[in-house]
Image (spheres, rainbow, N blue to C red):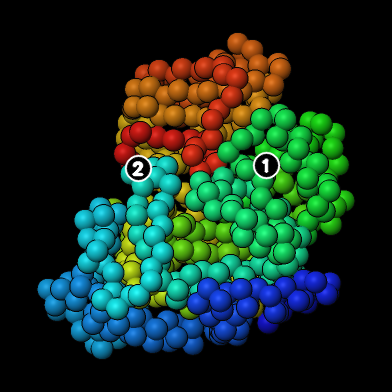
Amino acid sequence: MSVAVAQPRDRYTTWVANVLFPLHERLKGHDTRTRLRGLEATQWLDRSRLEALQLANLRRFLADIGARVPYYREMFAAVGMAPGNVQSLGDLAKLPLLTKPLIRANVDRLKADDAGKLMRYNTGGSSGEPLVFYMGADRVSHDVAAKWRATRWWGVDIGDPEIVVWGSPIELGAQDRLRQLRDRVLRTELLPAFDMSETNLDRFIERIKAKRPKMLFGYPSALAYIARHAERRNERVDGLGIKVAFVTSESLYDHQRRQIEKTFGCRVANGYGGRDAGFIAHECPEGSLHITAEDLIVELIDADGRVVPAGEPGEIVITHLATRDFPFLRYRTGDVGVLGNRACACGRGLPTLSEVKGRSTDFVVAMDGTVLHGLALIYVVRDLPGIRTFAIVQESLERTRVSIVPEGGFDERARTTIREGIKARLGAGVAVDVDVVESIAAERSGKHRYVKSMVSP
C-alpha cells in the first residue's frame, strides 16, 4: 500500500487545521472533523469491505428516508420497497430515478418531516432551468470533509495560503465582513473568475505573486487563462512554492492541465461534482479520480435507464447517503462518465471514474445523427495561431457558430480551416459562422464553456 508522506506544516496551518477550523465547523453544527477522521481510515479498506460499508449505510439511509420523507414514504409503498430486504448495491436499480423536474415538482415533499433547519441552494442553470434544493447539516459535513480529505492527499491543508478563482454569485454574494474575516484567518483569497479583463488578469498575477500560495483552486478554464496571460506577459510564476492546483466544476482538458502545470510549476488535481450531487470524486497524486464511496454510490445508466458495467460509458447517477433531510436517491446528473475497473497504485480501495466526459450539453450531434464529444470541435480551433480564446455553439443540426477572440495573426486561412474542420466532423451541409469578437462573456457562474449544443443527443 502506497501512503503519501506527510509534509511539514507551519505552526499557523497546524493551528487552523487542528483547532480553529474544527471549532468553526462545530459552531455551525457540523461534525466535519469527526467525519474526516472516519474518511481517512475507510479510504484504505479493500473493495469488498468498502462495499459492505456502503451496503450497511444504504440500508440505514433507505429505512430513514422511508420513514421520514413523504415523497419516499409514498414511493416505497407504491413499488413495494422494504429497505430491510435490500441484499446488494445492485438492488438500487429496482427504484425509480430522480430527475430535476421531479425535484421541482416535489420540493416540499422531499423534505424530511423532522429535518429542522435546512439551507436553500440552487444550481447555476447553465444547461437549463436552475434547480432549487435543500441541505441539512449532515450533507454539508460530508461534503466539506470529503474535500478536506482530498486536499490532504497532496500535502497541503486548510490554513495553507490559497488563491481561489471562482465566480458563483452565491459565493460572491456572501462576501460580507464576517466571511471576509474568515477567509483572511484561513489565508484564502478570492479572485473573481467572471471578469477576465486585461487589467484584472494583470492584477490576478500580482496577487498570486504577492500571496505565494501553497495551492490554487478554481475553474480549469479560468486558471488556464490566467496562466496563459502570465506567459504572454513573460511573468514567471513557477517558483512561488505552489504545490497543487485543484480544479473542478468544468471538464478539464489536456491542454489546460499542461498550461497550468507548466506556468505555475505544480501538479493539477481534478475534482468532479456539482452543487446538487455533491463532491463525487477527487484525483489522487497517482492520477486516479477516486469516488467518495463511503457516502456516495455511483451508477452509470444507458439511454433506456439500464445500469451499464465498469468500462462502458453511461450517464452518471448518484445516491448521496448523507442527504437524509432532503434525499438525492438515484439522481440523474446529466453527466457522462466511465467507471474504472483497476486498483489504484496509491493503495486506496475507493472506486474510480476512469473518465468524466462532461454534461450531455458538452456533446454535439452530426447531421447523420452521430454523437461526438465537444473535444472533436475544440481540437479544430484550439491550436490555431492568432486565437486568444473561443466558444463554439451548435445552434441546430444545420448551423454552428464559432466566436473567436483574436490575438494577432488570425486571418482568412484560419477562418477557412475552422469551417472545413467543423464540416468534416458535423457534415458538409452544416453552415459554419466564424465571428471575430472583442470578448466572450463567461456564464453567470464565472465558468467558460468552450462548446455548447442546443441539439439533444
The percent position of residue 247, horizontal first and vertical second, equals 62, 53
Question: On the image, which quarter does residue 66 sit in?
Answer: bottom left
Q: Which mark is residue 224?
A: 1
Q: Quadrant of the C terminus?
A: top left
Query: What type is the residue that disc 2 sits on?
Result: Gly
Kindly tell me whether residue 355 is visible in this rendering: no
Which residue is rendered at x = 24% and y = 64% of the image?
A: 108
Determine which residue is flagged by label 2. 128
> For numbered disc 2, what is the local secondary structure?
loop
**Image: 445 above or below 40:** above
> For numbered disc 1, what is the local secondary structure?
helix
Local crowd at mark 1 within 10 Å, few (<14), some, or many (≥20)? many
Question: On the image, which quarter does residue 55 sit in?
Answer: bottom left
Which residue is rendered at x = 33% and y = 69% of the image?
A: 326
Local crowd at mark 2 within 10 Å, few (<14), some, or many (≥20)? few
The percent position of residue 236, horizontal first and vertical second, equals 86, 42
Q: Which mark is residue 145?
A: none
Q: Tag count in the figure? A: 2
Which residue is rendered at x = 82% and y = 53% of the image?
A: 212
Query: What type is the residue that disc 1 sits on?
Result: Ala
**Image: 169 above or below 184:** above
Residue 267 is left or right of residue 55, and the answer is: right
Sooner in the amino-acid sequence: mark 1 or mark 2: 2
Which residue is rendered at x = 23% and y = 82% of the image?
A: 67
Question: On the image, which quarter does residue 245 sit in?
Answer: bottom right
CB under 8 Å between discs 1 and 2 = no
Task: State the CA–CA distance, disc 1 to disc 2.
Answer: 26 Å
